[in-house]
Structure formats: C-alpha cells, structure tokens
C-alpha cells in the first residue's frame, strides 16, 4: 500500500496555520535569493548549473533557513516568559496558577524546557551577542537546538560563575578551566577570569558542532580512578615534616597536575637521581 503525501495543518489556530503555510513559499523565495547572492559573489553564473542542481541547492538552503524557526521560537517564548514574570501575570490569571512554572506547564512547556528557554534568553544569548559579539543566527545554525539544550547548563555555569547543582556540570567546568589554565601556564601566559570564561564558552560552542552523542562524550569527562597516597611523618632537624608518596598512571597524573596547578613546582627526576638525592638517602636510612 502506497501512502501519498498530505498537507498537515501545523496549528490548531487557523491564523497561525495559514501563516505557516504561507511561510513555506516565502522561505523558498528567501532560499532562492540567498543562492543567487552567493553565486554572484563568487562570480559563478546560474547557467553553470542544471535546473535539477539549482532546485537541489534551493531546497537544501530552504531546509537550513527553516531551522531558524527553532531560534525564533526560543526568542519569542523567552520574551513572553520575561513579560509574564515581570508583570506577575500568571498570578492574576483566572486559572489561579501557584507559580509561573505551573502556568507554563499548562501551556505545554515542561519544567526543564521552561528553565532552558529562560536561561538561553536571559543569560546565554546576551553573553554570546553582547560580550563575544557573535552572530546568534549563525551560531544557532552551527550548534542546533538539541545541542544548545545539551550545552545550556554548562554555558550558564561558565557565564554566571555560580556553582551548578549538577555534579557532572561542575566537574566538566572544572576540567575545562584547569586544562585551559594549565595549557596557557605552560606557555607562560597568565589569564584573567574573563579570558578563562570566554575560552571555556568557545570550547563548548566548538563541541556543540559535533553530533549529539559525541558532544555528550566531550562535555561529560569521566573522573580517573582513585589512587592511594601514603603520608609518612618524618623529623628533619628539629622540624616535623610529612613525606607524601603516590603511584599513579598517566590519566591520574594529568588529573593531579590540573588540581595542583600553580601550587607545586614539578621537578622531573630519574630513578638514579632520586636514589642519590637527600630524599632517596632518607628512604635508604629508614630501611
């Protein structure tokens, strides 16, 4: 049995449904305009392509443009939520909502989606446009709606500087910050908090261009296996000191260096050198 394509009404409201139906034709015109401009700017004549090739390029460009509806939805919903909250309109609604979250839920917006829209509209988007000077529409095309939702709590943690209730988010932030600081310190570059913040946001947006599964792997680093640290009391002259010894693998060592960055001076030492050192002699005497 062959099923034919049908025309689906995109909204229960006839005015919105009619608008969206007309938008299909308008988006095709916009896609055609974009393609023509792109070809003219590159010095390529339209006659270079067949009608099938031109239609293929127009339809794919149209598909990309319609993706902007996701951004438009977030921006418009964010603006409306802000207006409703600022005027406490949910509290005077005849349905007697107990909170804005309840009012949003009654409009088909889940608590997680509500939080996501608020954070993107009030925190993330203003930072990307006003602080970093990015083209939001272009970034949205590169990252996409699902990846932006995935990145949102990590971006909010970075931008606000407020600790996240999520251990995964907090750990990911710490790893990113420590890696950035360690990399620049190795090159003799000191970074301000604002520079670290911008670097983390840049890395998150770069990761956001990956497929969603790869993005999750990138922003959810696993903690290395715990390791044992031996602490030995020792008297040096008249002063009591402590000797700290750990055996770690490469992953654990990298984690340790991130945590101790700026607090210790690392001196690479060969085993033979260690045996001849004061520390080595101390261990020998203890035997």
Image (tube, rainbow, N blue to C red):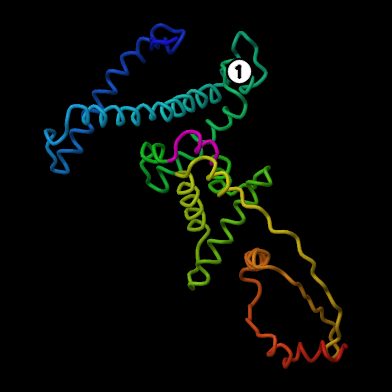
Q: Observer-nearest residue: 44 or 25?
A: 44
Q: What element does badge 1 sit on?
A: helix
Q: Position of residue 203 (x, y in %)?
A: 48, 52
Residue on which disc 1 sits: 103
Q: Is residue 19 above or below residue 235?
A: above
Residue 75 sits in quarter: top left
Of all residues, the one furthest to the top in this rendering is 14
- Quadrant where the N terminus sits is top left
Q: Observer-nearest residue: 35 or 169?
A: 35
Q: Is residue 249 above or below residue 80?
A: below
Q: Is residue 33 magenta?
A: no
Q: Is residue 26 above or below residue 200?
A: above
For residue 30, side relative to residue 118 (left or right): left
Q: Tag count in the figure?
A: 1
Q: Principal SS element in the magenta part? A: helix
Q: Position of residue 84 (x, y in %)?
A: 53, 21
The residue shown at (67%, 43%) is 166
The residue shown at (54%, 25%) is 86
For residue 92, side relative to residue 137 (left or right): right
Q: Position of residue 15 (x, y in %)?
A: 38, 8
Q: Position of residue 133 (x, y in %)?
A: 37, 46
For residue 218, side relative to residue 284 (left or right): left
- Quadrant where the C terminus sits is bottom right
For residue 40, side relative to residue 287 (left or right): left
Region of the chain picked out in magenta, as a range: 143-151
Circle 1 packing at 10 Å, graded few (<14), some (14-19), many (20+), is: some
């Amino acid at each position: 049995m062959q099923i034919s394509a049908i025309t689906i009404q995109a909204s229960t409201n006839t005015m919105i449904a009619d608008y969206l139906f007309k938008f299909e034709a308008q988006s095709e015109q916009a896609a055609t305009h974009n393609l023509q401009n792109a070809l003219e700017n590159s010095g390529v004549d339209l006659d270079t392509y067949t009608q099938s090739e031109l239609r293929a390029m127009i339809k794919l460009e149209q598909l990309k443009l319609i993706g902007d509806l996701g951004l438009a939805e977030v921006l418009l919903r964010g603006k409306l939520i802000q207006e409703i909250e600022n005027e406490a309109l949910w509290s005077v609604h005849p349905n007697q909502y107990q909170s804005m979250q309840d009012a949003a839920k009654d409009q088909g917006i889940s608590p997680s989606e509500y939080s996501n829209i608020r954070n993107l509209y009030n925190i993330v988007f203003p930072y990307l446009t006003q602080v970093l000077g990015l083209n939001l529409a272009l970034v949205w095309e590169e990252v996409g709606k699902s990846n932006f939702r995935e990145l949102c709590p990590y971006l909010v943690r970075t931008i606000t500087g407020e600790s996240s209730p999520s251990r995964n988010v907090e750990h990911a932030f710490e790893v990113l910050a420590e890696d950035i600081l360690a990399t620049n310190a190795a090159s003799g570059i000191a970074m301000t908090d604002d520079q670290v913040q911008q670097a983390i946001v840049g890395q998150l947006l770069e990761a956001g261009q990956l497929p969603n599964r790869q993005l999750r792997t990138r922003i959810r680093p696993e903690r290395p296996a715990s390791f044992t640290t031996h602490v030995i009391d020792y008297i040096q002259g008249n002063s009591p000191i402590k000797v700290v010894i750990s055996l770690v693998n490469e992953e654990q060592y990298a984690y340790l260096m991130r945590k101790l960055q700026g607090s210790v001076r690392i001196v690479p030492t060969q085993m033979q050198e260690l045996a001849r050192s004061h520390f080595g002699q101390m261990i020998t005497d203890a035997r």
